[in-house]
Image: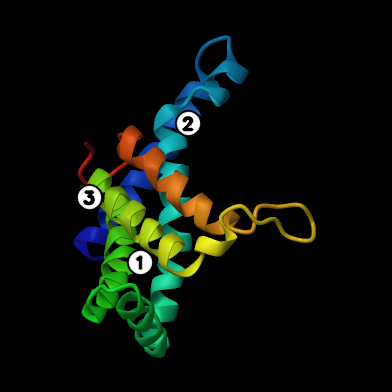
Amino acid sequence: MGDNAQGVYITIQSACTDFRARTISGRNTMNGLLHNDALGKLILRLTVGILMLFHGVAKIMNPGTVDHIGGALSGSGLPSFLAYGVYIGEVIAPLMIILGVYCRHGAIIIVVNMLFAILLMHTGEIFAVTEHGGWRLELQGFYLFGALAIMFLGSGRQAVKPD
């Protein structure tokens, strides 16, 4: 097992041990279940990071999407080479968040990535709703506000490099 994989295994094992200790010891079992900031931060980090990483992997497997982003950037007066920043925002930054290495920095990168995505590709949908009444940009909003939460909360204790 590599060093990074071992670190992730130890992090998850530590979160579970902390969770068991809170639920077994003491009278307030339910209180222990519901008050675990470190586990909550880990769940938020893994959810945002893994789901965003799927988008990055899709862009690696379909490189034509980067050309589409480059076209949108040049159409807005920005250099098209900035489109390659999507790999940083959707591959490297999610890995930083998942592992908990410079987690706040990774979250800031995802926030910037999502602001670019919303402003370049979805400006006309900001106030739109779906046929079912949901916000048209709920997925983009989830990534944006989830990354903002991680930026303010930090990695928590269950991280390779806690902040």
Q: Residue at x 42, y 88 (%)?
A: 62
The kind of residue tagged 2 is: Phe
Numbered label attached to residue 19: 2
Question: Is 123 displayed left or right of 70 in the figure?
Answer: right
The Cα–Cα distance between marks 2 and 1, rounded to whole angstroms, is 30 Å
- How packed mark 2 is, by other alpha carbons closer than 10 Å (few <14, some 14-19, many 20 or more), is some
Seen from this angle, which residue lies furthest right? 132
* Residue 93 % position (x, y): 29, 59
Q: Are marks 2 and 1 in contact (CB under 8 Å)?
A: no
* Residue 59 % position (x, y): 40, 80
Residue corresponding to mark 3: 101
Numbered label attached to residue 90: 1
- How packed mark 1 is, by other alpha carbons closer than 10 Å (few <14, some 14-19, many 20 or more), is many
Q: Residue at x 36, y 83 (%)?
A: 71
Q: Earlier in the sequence, mark 1 or mark 3?
A: 1
* Residue 139 % position (x, y): 56, 58
Seen from this angle, which residue lies furthest top? 27
Q: Earlier in the sequence, mark 2 or mark 1?
A: 2
